[in-house]
Image (cartoon, rainbow, N blue to C red):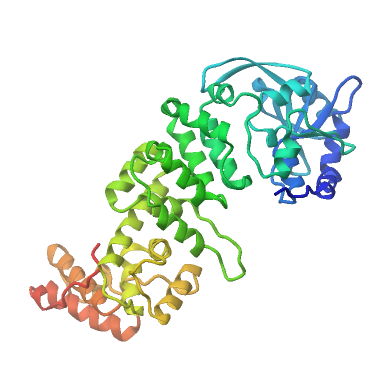
Amino acid sequence: MSQSLDEAALRAVLAQPRLARVFVALDAAAEETRLVGGAVRDALLGRPVADIDLATTLLPEAVVAQANAAGLKPVPTGIAHGTVTVVVEGEPFEVTTLREDIETDGRHAVVRFGRDFARDAARRDFTINALSVTPDGRVHDTVGGLADLAASRVRFIGEARQRIREDYLRVLRFFRFHARYGAGAPDPAGLAASIEARDGLALLSRERVRGELLKLLAAPGAPAVTAVLSQTGLLQRLIGGIGDLGRLARLAGAETDEAGDARPDPVRRLAALAVRSASDAERLREGLRLSKAEHARLAAYAGAEASLHGACDPLTVADLRRLVAVHGAEAAVDATLALTGEPRPVLTPEAADALARLAAGADPVPVLPVTGAGLVAAGARPGRSLGLGLAAARRAWLAQGCPTDAEAAAHLRAVALAAAGGTPEDAPRSPPFKN
């Protein structure tokens, strides 16, 4: 089933005044500059165009000179590789000199500058990424990209195995682009070549793998494509374990809001797919070179998920406040969404509403209304006994559903002072949620 391409949207992109200024600035005898890549692809699909990239026959030094002459700001962001960012009224446009591959090793390519748009297109990865457009709106397609775009088909340019040997990251890009732009089953030739090249994934930096995997998980077709990755054995190489495909699929459905708009969160989806314990979070941190924030989020999710599975149903507002106090609001939201459709947890309507308010920032995260400084001011002695007092107050606070009003604060201060005086066993027992 083919889809119509939006030529009017493409013309609207070309008509943007700032882009027009770049085309005028780079206009020169015997030279040519075109709009290329993702901007052309997304405009023709009627999707928002984020980054606007241009390809040109001009050498980088000439791009800099002509941009300066036109009063624009050239920034040599990658001039050794032929890329100059031209800034117009604060908006950046990447301008790259045409290139030809001389040598590739599966990770990096040695290139030289060229003047042939067709040869530049032939060195790209997928047909839908190799379209170019002249300032007058004429689309150039030398590899069959328009037909593939209309058919929602992601296909390697030329021989798939050769394209992958040039850069093994293209294995992951193949699945990622299919998850965003493809329909139905992946292209058979591309799928076969990707499976055959699976050992090449070990040559890639873990940072590059992480980037592609998170982008894939954020795509509309992530659940179906991740299932294909699992069936082919590629997913296990990426995450170091077996993925929970059902949980990922249910989460993707739960992330759709009432208006039908998807709100994909790739880190949350990674948690749903691959995290059941703190050790899973640690394995992913090492295997994917996750940031500290990403790892901390996965670890907090693991704790919240375990607490929810061990809780009695239904969860009340007090239960939810305990969960948030121990693991954080983000982890509570991540875990409850990831467990959508499973036997546990079951939230009361009031608890679900409270969770939504906490997630939206409408309600503050509960904080123990007793501090060490306050206890010292009330007569407690600094030292071990003070720590016992605070621990007793926290146990009582959690058991009571994390109240923060003045009456609760006074009661908790009394509990803490009693425990600090040597009677911590009088404090209420710990709640079911453990830190």
Image quadrant of residue 80?
Answer: top right
Q: Which of 148 and 424 is in front in this view?
A: 148
Report the residue at 74% width, 23% height from top. Answer: 97
Q: Position of residue 162 (x, y in %)?
A: 57, 21
Q: Position of residue 358 (x, y in %)?
A: 45, 71
Task: Give the side of residue 54 with respect to residue 154, left or right.
Answer: right
Report the residue at 50% width, 73% height from top. Answer: 362
Task: Give the side of residue 122 with respect to residue 333, left or right.
Answer: right
Quarter containing the C terminus: bottom left
Q: Where is residue 348 in the image (x, y as percent from the top left)?
A: 38, 80
How many labels, in total? 0
> Measured along the vertical axis of the image, is residue 282 above or below residue 259?
above
Q: Where is residue 34 in the image (x, y as percent from the top left)?
A: 81, 32
Task: Give the side of residue 393 with respect to residue 368, left or right.
Answer: left
Toward the bottom, the furthest residue is 407
> Measured along the vertical axis of the image, is residue 70 above or below residue 402?
above
Is residue 60 in view? no
Q: Which of 374 and 37 is in front in this view?
A: 37
Report the residue at 13% width, 63% height from top. Answer: 384
Is residue 233 in view? yes
> Measured along the vertical axis of the image, is residue 392 above or below residue 52?
below
